[in-house]
Amino acid sequence: MCKIILHNGKIYTNDPENPTVEAIGIVNGVIEVLGSFEKVRKAIPGGRIVDLEGRIALPGLVDSHIHLNSLGSLAASLDLTKCNSIEELKLMVRRESENRGKGSWIIGRGWDQERLYEKRPPNRWDLDEATPSNPVLLVRVCGHVASVNSLALRIAGVSRETPDPPGGIIERDSNGEPTGVLYENAIMLIKRVIPPPSTEQLETMLSKAIEEGLKYGITLFGFPSATSSDMRALMNLKSKGLLKARVGVMYDLEYLDHLLRLGIRGGFGDGKLYILGVKTFLDGSLGGRTAYLREEYSDRPGWRGKLLLSTDELKYIVRKAHVSSIIVAFHAIGDGALQTLLSSIDNNTSSIVRIEHASVSPPDIIEKMRETMPMAIVVQPHFVISDWWIKDRIGERARWAYPFKTFIESGLVVAGSSDAPVEPVNPWKGMWAATSRSGPERITVEDAIKMYTINGGIAMGLAGYGMLVKGGYGDIIVVDEDPFKVEPNKLTSIKVKMTIVGGRMVYSNY
Ligand SMILES: [Zn+2]
């Protein structure tokens, strides 16, 4: 039996009946007792005792939408953002090649010629000097330019005879020989020959991504657009006892029919690893002008973006998924996409519908949300910071962007998330963005924490998660400052000292 007691702290429970306690006891992952140290110690004799030394503890945080696979592959690639010269970059590649077998791909990201001493992109001859025996792909910080070595070109079959692909440029020297610098779609010539990671590599990548979250106090991860390979790797980790947090998987939509054929209902699995449902896209992004708006973009007349599913298709998906209580997370950013989605659901089917992003939500859209009550609205507060150009894109409609306060006042369940690696993993940055923005949609710290705890639990299909009560999940974090007492602009610097999942200490920085 695994017993742990935390005491001598100020433990916020999120339970209105019992808002703070001094001690808590967890037995086999489940909260057994809360109250005074006296009471807890008596109830759990022989438990491992952890002294919080007066620190603050809270329920574990939920990131309801985090791309663990993309985050993991980023963590597995070389970070070139700090490189100051091509020589330095070559050294990093050479070291990496020494750590690996011949032939395995070395991928790096983040170089910027403005930062490099040589003031030019690295070319194939530079990278051949670093390693002739591993294919190398180094993507520029923007993602639109990449440098590769000769082996990578050879594997991809790119030579002086290869024409530029549509929408891409293969840079060539004065003799017509490819230099190894590729622009836009020409990068795909290389990317498509890179083998997908093995299950073992995927296990490492996914654990790295999860560990990154544990560092910030995330104990429950919502994993959208997952594939069968991702699930296989997660199951392997779990059976080896290496899955350190809880993961709710949302498969790519193409898996919906498989789930239905197998008779699987949403929630299949256990509290550690389970199938929440599927995820799909209704439109694109505001940044790329692919989000679907009801009226034209302010900076591109006549263009409204693109809707990726029709009302009929939507209704069909929702009806099918509803029969098996499979949650469908719909990526919907523009008001046009949101309107189409909301007109395809009703009070009955809305219980399985999660709306991801809901970025442009004018009052009539929020009214429709209030009428239909989807399971949750999953938002990423950090977009408020990143989308600083939003007024150029949508003009006056920007006042309806990310209306967290109006969502909350309308009684909607608003859950927080990062959408990492698009935005930073750190949920404290998300809370900071939501509580220190200017204007009427700023929310309180209490509401922000609720977004990342109780409401995250609801969005993840684990009702009661994010609250420390008897019989509840033993997921707790210890932090170095009281989030309810610090200035909102200091929320971003809160450090997590300890993360506990199911009574097990999975991260500690004591
Ligand atoms: Zn996403």
Image (cartoon, rainbow, N blue to C red):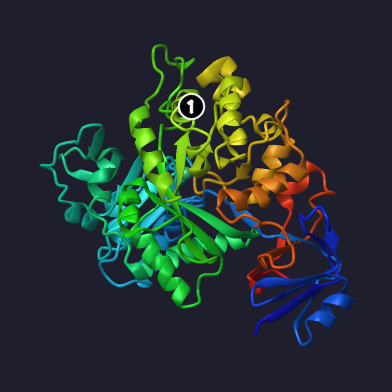
Between 373 and 152, the one nearer to me in the picture: 373
The quarter of the picture where residue 475 lies is bottom right
Note whether residue 94 is visible: no
Q: In the picture provided, is 493 more to the left or to the right than 89?
A: right
Q: Residues within 10 Å of mark 1 (few under 14, many from 20)?
A: many
Ligand 1 closer than 8 Å to label 1 CB: no
- Percent coordinates x, y for residue 328 in the rendering: 44, 44
Identity of the residue drawn at 32% across and 66% down: 198
The secondary element bearing badge 1 is classed as loop
User: What residue appears at the point 58 percent right and 22 percent down from the top-left corner?
Assistant: 362
The residue pinned by badge 1 equals 334
Q: Residue at x 39, y 40 (%)?
A: 319
Q: Quadrant of the N terminus?
A: bottom right
In the displayed structure, would residue 506 be above or below residue 325? below
Q: Position of residue 147 (x, y in %)?
A: 32, 48
Query: Can the viewer see residue 22?
Result: yes
Q: Nearer the viewer, residue 159 or 405?
A: 405
